[in-house]
Amino acid sequence: MLELRNLSKHYGELIAVDNVSLEIRHNELFCLLGPSGSGKTTILRMIAGFEKPTSGQILLEGKDITKIPPHKRNVNTVFQNYALFPHLNVRDNIAYGLQIRKFPQDEIEKRVKHYLKIMHLPDKRYSYPHQLSGGQQQRVALARALINEPAIILLDEPLGALDEKLRDKMQVELSNIQRTVKTTFIMVTHNQEESLTMADRIAVMKDGNIEQLGLPEEIYSTPTSRFVAEFIGDTNILEGDIVYRDGDFLKIKLATGDVIQKIAKRNVPEIDQILLSIRPEQLKMWKRKPEYEDNLFEGTIRNEVFYGDFSIFIVELGNGLNVQVMFQNILPSGVNKQSFQEKEQIWVGWTKLAGHLLWD
């Protein structure tokens, strides 16, 4: 559907986007994810035509649109603030693009009715933007973009203006809408949860480059760099020296002692030092030393952050190394699990299959 070829954008000496190449598929919900200044919004604006590339090409359905003005591109943008016309009701906001293009009135009414139904807004037809919730305003803005039947919808931080509870609900709604209308969506966000929940594929951006591209599960479970591991969710990064290799396993000497770790899909190069990324949910915690054959260390609980059904414990292992451990507070039966106290001596461990090796 869309191809970026060696796309760059410079602002004087600042390189906002650095020689990015990317292919986005038909009917895909694709996410550009990264912190502020990573280049994700600049890429979106170049696709929309609001910024001119310094070099490179943008191809839409095989046609070079790099120099085509925004209004002549078969692309529509939904902005973070929705940009609805306050003096127009929902029906007229949605119909605006077709009216400007002088579509027949019966065709306009047919499409408006169709998108009001998809957006679950038929009873809001004559309401004005100030009478709508944030989620309803967003759906109106999306309907206004979709009614023109563009090849691609661009979403700039689409959930950024919503409160947390509504944002969680709209993640599901937006995904469902995208699958219903079968239109390619390209979304820009700095929110990792949004990207993991909604996207078919994710490009993690850093300093104007794509740090990693893949499925949400791949990005989370097998990050290719320390930046991606730490940016996507929470993780513990343990630094160590490779002591020896034994087939599919490495023995790694950490500050707290030796661990055995299974080698990931990527072949580990001939290096001496390595990083081990372990998600908090991959660690286990016990009050007494278990009969446990894998990596096991004694530690002291320094803090607990309570989230309701689970807690995150900060545990100090040997040599002052702190790790985060996720602990489920409530069993599926609804019974509370045993509690842990601050300053309590406990044991922390993980299997040699847990974690992920990094060297970038």
Image (tube, grey):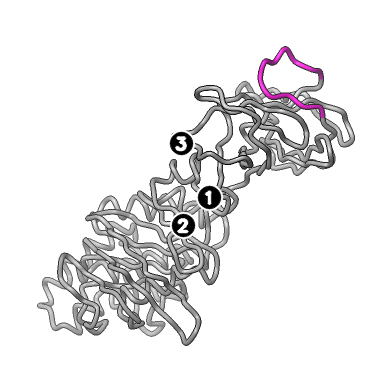
The residue identified by callout 3 is 267
Question: Is residue 296 inside the magenta stretch?
Answer: yes
Q: Residue furthest right?
A: 343
Residue 6: x, y in percent? Answer: 31, 69
Asked if the residues shown at circle 1 and circle 2 are in contact, with their CB atoms under 8 angstroms apart, the answer is yes
Q: Which residue is pictured at 37% across the width and 64% down the height?
A: 139
Q: Quadrant of residue 164?
A: bottom right
Tag of residue 225: 1
The residue identified by callout 2 is 211
Pointer 2: residues within 10 angstroms few (<14), some, or many (20+)? some
Q: Dot 1 lies on which element? A: loop
Q: Which residue is pictured at 79% across the width and 17% down the height?
A: 289
Label whose residue precedes the other's in the sequence (1 or 2): 2
Which residue range is magenta in the image? 288-298
Toward the viewer: 92 or 25? 25
> Where is the N terminus found, in terms of image quarters?
bottom left
